Image (spheres, helix red, strand yellow):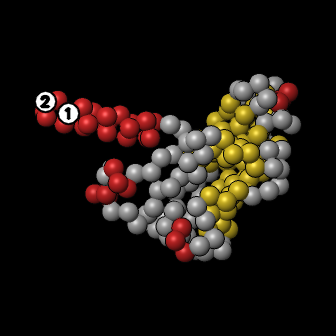
Amino acid sequence: MSVLAAAGVHTFDGYLFYEKMSSNGSGVVDVPAGQAAKVRDIEWKATVSPTKAPPDNRHGSDVAWMKIDIRQKVLAEGSATMTAAPLDIKLHDRAGRTWAVELADADRPTDRLEVGKEYVLEGLAVVPVPVVNEVELSFRPTDYRSDTPTADLFKRKNVTPPLDTLRFRR
């Protein structure tokens, strides 16, 4: 009986961990146009605007190029090692369709960010011309810390559930 109880407790614990980690955050946080969002002592700002197509563009005139500008500022020393770029960066339209955003390589530190300094991540996306004025940016900030020892990355006590998705309104 005690073996069955131990197996049951272990299975239930594994299920709770799976539930905690498999969600994509607890929801979407809407950020009003022109405003910033604060997540774990980091301020995030973002803008989306049309831009000219690159010269080597293979797309036709039925698509528009969008410039993505994401700004990250560490507000407290305790978050200075949260150096990773955000996850799941996408553009959304009102119909629920999504388009991928490709970030350019950023010249930023990989070990520690400076408190109060604004770091810029730039990207591009291609969307159909009819939605150029309605697409909105969303992404999930990550809680990865550069000072976490590799051996500790997959320990349950160090793993936190995914953060909410930030959606920047236009």
Q: Give the number of the disc on residue 31.
A: none
Q: Residues within 10 Å of mark 1 (few under 14, many from 20)?
A: few
Q: Position of residue 97 (x, y in %)?
A: 71, 26
| Quadrant (top left, top right, bottom left, bottom right) of the C terminus | top right
Q: Are marks 2 and 1 in contact (CB under 8 Å)?
A: yes
The outermost residue toward the front is 1
- Which one is in front, 51 or 136? 136
Q: In the picture provided, is 6 more to the left or to the right than 70? A: left
The residue under label 2 is 1
Residue 73 in the image: state x and y as whole percent: 65, 66
Which residue is at 55% across, 42% downward? 25
Is residue 149 toward the left or the right of residue 145 in the image? Answer: left
Residue 92, picture quadrant = top right
Q: Secondary structure at mark 2?
A: loop
| Residue for point 43% across, 36% down | 19
Q: Secondary structure at mark 1?
A: helix
Judge whether residue 162 can be spotted in this image.
yes
The answer to whether residue 51 shows anywhere in this view is no
Q: Is residue 77 left or right of residue 59?
A: left
Residue ID for mark 1 = 5
Q: State the quadrant of the N terminus.
A: top left
- Kindly identify the amino acid type of the residue bearing the numbered disc 1: Ala
For disc 2, the neighbor class at 10 Å (few under 14, some 14 to 19, many from 20) is few
Observer-nearest of 152 and 53: 152
Place residue 158 in its image quadrant: bottom left
> How far, Cα to Cα, is label 2 from label 1?
6 Å
Tell me what residue is drawn at x 80 percent, y 56 percent.
Answer: 35
Name the one closer to the observer, 85 or 34.
34
Image coordinates of residue 29 in percent, x first then y, are: 69, 45
Residue flagged by tag 2: what amino acid is it? Met
Q: Position of residue 106 (x, y in %)?
A: 59, 58
